[in-house]
Amino acid sequence: MAIYKISRESISDQVFGQMKELILEGEWKPGEKIPSENELAQQFGVSRVTVRNALQKLSALELLETRFGEGSFVRSPDAAAMLSPLVSAAYINDKGLEEILQLRSMIEGPVCKEACRRADDAGKAELADIFRRMRQARDYLP
């Protein structure tokens, strides 16, 4: 077994991670104004610069919208807005790919459930075939 250096997650990445979870888990609702930079800095016990860095990352992922003079607001869930930044999300930190896969599992499960609920017999057969092909492809992976 190889030994790897231990990396310390930056304070900004920790704040970003907690805020992202608040959004993805629905604690902060779409359209809701989040606390100000000053309030967040006080709540997290960090500087405003650290909070601002986390806010910029969340805005880059299109999870937040910052309005000049008004504050930052949680963006409404929109498939295009959520999926378009996924590739760049892998570059935000060392856990990018893991976070993308976690996000996909959070989105795809409920979407598939709803697709099955709404599908007619032909649609259900098509979904079953897609699932079968997906499992076959997975079995070929090393």
Image: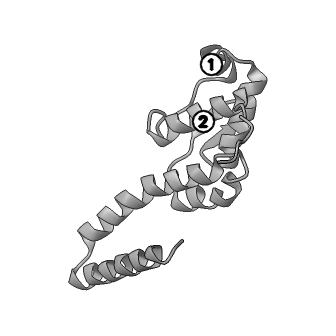
Colour scheme employed for the rendering of this structure: one colour
Q: What residue lies at 65% left-to-right and 41% top-to-bottom?
A: 58
> What residue sits right under mark 1 in the picture?
44
Work out which residue is located at the far bottom of the displayed protein and give it. 122
Which label sits on residue 14? none
Q: What residue lies at 69% left-to-right and 46% top-to-bottom?
A: 94
Q: Secondary structure at mark 1?
A: helix
Q: Secondary structure at mark 2?
A: helix
Can I make out residue 136 in this image? yes
Q: What residue lies at 29% left-to-right and 81% top-to-bottom?
A: 123
Work out which residue is located at the far right of the displayed protein and give it. 49
Q: How many marks?
A: 2
- Residue 121, given in percent of the width and then of the height, sits at 21, 82
Q: What residue lies at 64% left-to-right and 23% top-to-bottom?
A: 36
- Residue 82, given in percent of the width and then of the height, sits at 57, 55
- Residue 52, given in percent of the width and then of the height, sits at 74, 30
Q: Nearer the viewer, residue 52 or 46?
A: 46
Residue 88, picture quadrant: bottom right
- Work out whether 59 lies above or below 132: above
> What residue sits right under mark 2 in the picture?
17
- Work out whether 11 lies above or below 55: above
Q: Amino acid at mark 2?
A: Gly
Q: Amino acid at mark 1?
A: Phe
Residue 122, picture quadrant: bottom left
